[in-house]
Image (cartoon, grey):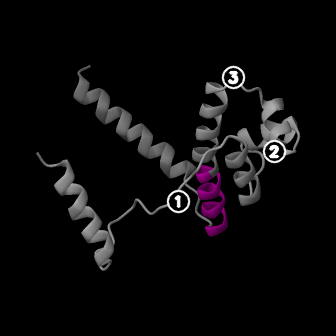
């Protein structure tokens, strides 16, 4: 088998799995998106906790909750609320930013101006 054939097989298999696993109900789609957002956030939290060599129990104490609850969050068994996210951010002295990365807003002149300024700084 050559690489092209393997890539085609992989793409076909992935497409089949995506079709079967893709939620069809609106509530299921929202649940999936919420879990994906939480997973991205918690991944960054875990990286920082690992960097500081913090155990889950220590992190839980820092935010006033149980290690069991944090484990449920990290496993995706419970959804985290923004208050818990804020506690984690504060406990680890982090600052997160929420922004739209899906598309450029062409009707926003401030964004266009900021893009042009960044381009000028990056050019030699």
**Label 1 environment density (alpha carbons within 10 Å; few <14, some 14–19, many ≥20):** few
Q: Residue furthest left?
A: 124
In-image side of 17 versus 25 (left or right): left
Q: What x and y, as percent, mark residue 74?
A: 72, 39
Q: Circle 2 is placed at which residue position? A: 63
Distance of label 2 from label 3 (alpha carbons): 16 Å
Comparing 6 with 60, the one in front is 60
Residue 115 versus residue 42 in the image, above or below: below
Q: Which mark is residue 98?
A: 1
Q: What x and y, as percent, mark residue 72?
A: 80, 41
| Image point (84%, 42%), residue name | 69
Residue 8 versus residue 51 in the image, above or below: below
In-image side of 118 versus 75 (left or right): left
Magenta residues, as a range? 26-37
In-image side of 101 versus 58 (left or right): left
Q: What x and y, as percent, mark residue 26?
A: 61, 68
Residue 44 in which image quadrant: top right
Distance of label 1 from label 3 (alpha carbons): 27 Å
Residue 80 versus residue 13 in the image, above or below: below
| Image point (59%, 53%), residue name | 37
Q: Circle 3 is placed at which residue position? A: 53
| Image point (60%, 39%), residue name | 43
Of labels 2 and 1, earlier in sequence is: 2
Q: Is 30 a magenta residue?
A: yes
Marks 2/1 in contact by CB < 8 Å: the verdict is: no
Marks 2/3 in contact by CB < 8 Å: the verdict is: no
- Helix, strand or loop at disc 3? loop
Q: Is 50 a magenta residue?
A: no
């Amino acid at each position: 088998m050559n690489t092209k054939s393997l890539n085609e097989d992989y793409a076909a298999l992935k497409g089949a799995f995506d079709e079967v696993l893709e939620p069809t109900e609106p509530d299921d789609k929202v649940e999936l998106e919420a879990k994906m957002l939480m997973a991205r956030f918690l991944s960054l939290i875990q990286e920082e906790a690992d960097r500081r060599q913090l155990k889950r129990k220590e992190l839980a104490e820092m935010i006033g909750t149980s290690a069991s609850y944090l484990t449920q969050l990290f496993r995706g068994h419970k959804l985290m609320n923004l208050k818990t996210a804020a506690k984690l951010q504060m406990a680890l002295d982090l600052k997160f930013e929420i922004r739209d990365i899906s598309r450029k807003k062409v009707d926003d002149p401030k964004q266009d101006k900021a893009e042009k300024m960044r381009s000028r700084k990056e050019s030699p």
